[in-house]
Amino acid sequence: MTVRQQWTIVLGIVALLAVLLAAATHYLGDELFPVSVGSAAPAMSARTLDGTKRTKTLDDYKGRVVLLNVWATWCEPCKVEMPSIEKLHREFGPQGLAVIAVSVDDAGTEDRIRDFAKELGITFEILHDPTRATTASYQITGFPETFIIGREGTIRKKYIGAADWSSDANRALIRELLGPVTASR
């Protein structure tokens, strides 16, 4: 066997391994790379519900502590927890907490989403992802599902189901992630 034939075999094996690795990553991605506390927050993209209908991504909140809530208007537990998220937003929003609620309602339901937010007195940012790409990238298993993301982009808490986000424990976590409040000059 010549050196050229040996290198051809080696390169063929390397190419085969690369294809197998790519296939395993594609088909087993959730198992290989679970979205959990300590992992980097996956990218997300959703549309605003204001007149501009801009697309916003997690990068728009870079350097801030983020509460990312994935929900739907038809979800009763979502409706139950929204007032406590609003309370948390009012307390910590001015200190740098970005609250983002991503609705995964179907396309064409923007008015229903706006009415839902208005009915509950929601003042934090509501985005719409009718493609449910956020559901896939965050490996959502049910609604609501909430992620607390630190300034550095790491998931610090993951909660499945409705929670009391104005509880002492959740407020302490947010306070800790925001760090000490410094006086402005």
Image (cartoon, rainbow, N blue to C red):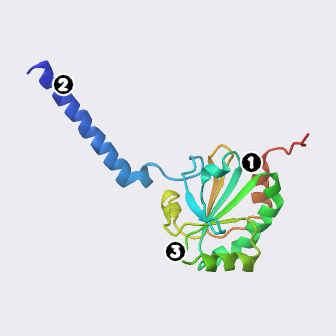
Tell me the kind of residue under disc 1: Leu
Q: Is residue 42 left or right of residue 165?
A: left
Cα separation, mark 1 vs mark 2, equals: 53 Å
**Mark closer to the chain start, 1 or 2:** 2
Residue 151, numbered label: none
Q: Is residue 11 left or right of residue 93?
A: left
Q: Nearer the viewer, residue 81 or 114?
A: 114
Q: How far across and how far down the image is residue 119, in percent?
A: 73, 80
Tell me the kind of residue under disc 3: Ala
Which is closer to the viewer, label 2 or label 3? 3
Q: Is residue 16 left or right of residue 43?
A: left
Which residue is at 33% across, 43% downward? 21
Residue 7, numbered label: 2
**Label 2 secondary element:** helix
Which residue is at 33% across, 45% downward? 22
**Mark closer to the chain start, 2 or 3:** 2
Cα separation, mark 1 vs mark 3, equals: 35 Å
**Quadrant for the C terminus in the image:** top right
Residue 177, numbered label: 1
